[in-house]
Every structure is written in C-alpha cells, then in structure tokens.
Image (spheres, rainbow, N blue to C red):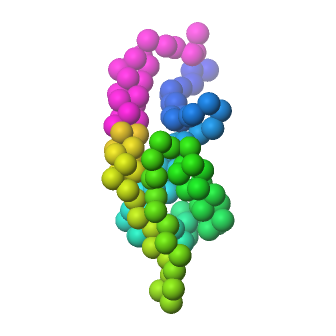
Amino acid sequence: MKKDYNISLSLRINIGNDTVLASGKVELLIKIKEMGSLRKAAEEMKMSYRKAWFSIHKINNLASETVVVLKRGGKNGGVATITDYGNSIISQYISLRKDVDIFISKNSSKYDFNK
C-alpha cells in the first residue's frame, strides 16, 4: 500500500552539545518580545515559568551576547526585553528555517520511501 511520506527537519543551533536555539526557544523569545513579560509568554505557551526562566538563562549564558534582559517586577510584575542581538538571532533563525524548508520542498521529490 502506498503511503504519503513527507520530509521535515528539526533545526537546532548548538554550541558543543548545548542547544542555544530551537523552534520552541525561538517561539518563547517571540512571545517575550510581543508581551514584554517572561511570565505572560510562558503562560501563553502553556509552559511553567520555571522552565521558561531556565530556557532564557541557558540562552543568555550560551550566546555570545545577552539575548533577553529580565527585570524583576514590582506591583505590576517583571519586564523582559529582547536585546538588539536577540532580535538579530531571532531573524536569522527564522530566515534559516525558511531556507531549510525551501530546500526540502525543492528536493523531496528525489526520494520515494515507498520503494
């Protein structure tokens, strides 16, 4: 029976064995940029604040520059800001993701996993 296969790739940017960026981390960065808050971004993604905080902490520690500036909150909560460098790596990741998707689209017809 013929099956409809499709090809997809996960895109991870690593330093050594540590992942700096992947789709979920980029999504978190985009939500932080939109909402200005790590807590709100985490809630939007149905992620615990702790997991979101550790993700941002890891990104900031691995990247060559600070990606997210976190300021502890007062009565209205904290503020999270994406730096210029952070915006740059978000844009580059999205652009690379598009390039990878185009490559897959152009080349996937070469392969037939039904044989």
Q: Is residue 4 visible?
A: no
Between 75 and 39, which is closer to the camera in this rendering? Answer: 75
Image height of 80 relative to 92, above or below: below
Residue 73 at x, y = what percent?
A: 51, 80
In front: 68, or 97?
68
Instruction: Looking at the picture, tell me which residue is in the foreground, 56 or 63.
Output: 63
What is the residue that sits farthest to the front in this orientation?
65
Depth order, front residue of 11/63? 63
Measured as percent of width and height from the top left, residue 64 is found at 47, 42
When the figure is inspected, residue 56 is found, relative to residue 76, above or below; the finding is above
Magenta stretch in the rendered image: 94-115
Residue 25, image x, y percentages:
52, 50
Would you say residue 97 sits in the magenta stretch?
Answer: yes
Q: Quadrant of the N terminus?
A: top right
> Per the image, is 89 magenta?
no
Residue at the image position 57 percent from the left and 21 percent from the top: 2
Q: Is residue 31 left or right of residue 10?
A: left
SS majority, magenta? helix
Q: Residue at x 53, y 76 (%)?
A: 72
Do we see residue 85 in this rendering? yes
Does residue 33 sit above or below 103 in this rendering? below
Q: Which residue corresponds to the image point at 45% horizontal and 68% vertical from the top-left? A: 80
* Percent coordinates x, y for residue 114 in the rendering: 57, 15
Q: Quadrant of the C terminus?
A: top right
Taking the image as shown, residue 91 lies to the left or right of residue 62, namely left
